[in-house]
Image (spheres, rainbow, N blue to C red):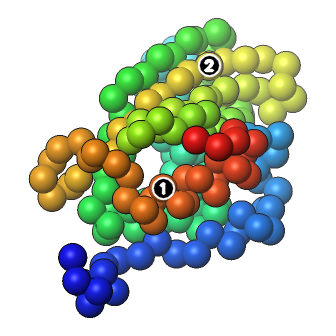
Amino acid sequence: MSEEQLLNQPQLPPTSALDNSSGRLLENWFEYPVRAQPHHTDYAGIVWHGSYITWMEEARVECLRSIGIDFADLVALGCDLPVVELSVRYHHSLQLGKTAVVKARMAEVTGVRIKWDYVIESPDRQVSYVTAKVTLVAVDRERGKIMRQLPASVKDVLSRLSTSMGIGDW
């Protein structure tokens, strides 16, 4: 790729937000509050199991946004991050109108695989509703194939996020 083509490639915004902690990345977890709305529940007023997964994805996207990375910018770089593995453990049901906190953190990056951990719990931390692990993989949107390696700009962002979350070198 020529230097001119490189300069014209979409770039991720700077990640200076990591240098000035926003307070949302607490104890190595990003916290995302939710409230069980009618469309999240079944007829008995219990949160439908798929709603928890939606909340986890929202928390992951908002975690990236909190450090200045809009998911649309990743897409503009030609990189998509689909879920390739999901493990969910349901502990207690959440009811209509109740609030919860979705805690998300990037746990590990290995090659093009990115693993996230989740805990969904009551605001007072007394009730654990869900724990989960999700693995994402970087896919070249244009070719529709798994990338051999993360684009340098994406790797840099994830490296800085992992450092801010206390994951260490990867």
Q: Nearer the viewer, mark 2 or mark 1?
A: 1
Residue at 30% of width from left, 81% of height from top? 6
Q: In this view, does 18 lie to the left or right of 40?
A: right
Q: Answer yes or no: do the residues labelled 2 and 1 have beta carbons within 8 Å?
A: no
Residue 52 seen in render:
yes
Q: On residue 127, which mark appears? A: none
Q: Which amino acid does label 1 sit on?
A: Lys
- Pointer 1: what residue? 155
The one nearer the camera, 99 or 73, is 73
Rendered position, 107 above or below 147:
above
Q: Is residue 92 left or right of residue 109?
A: right
Q: Distance between the residues labelled 2 and 1?
A: 29 Å
Q: Where is residue 119 in the image (x, y as percent from the top left)?
A: 66, 26
Residue at 51% of width from left, 39% of height from top? 109
- Pointer 2: what residue? 130
The residue lying furthest to the front in this view is: 2
Residue 47 seen in render:
no
Label 2: element kind? strand
Label 1: element kind? helix
Residue at 64% of width from left, 53% of height from top? 161
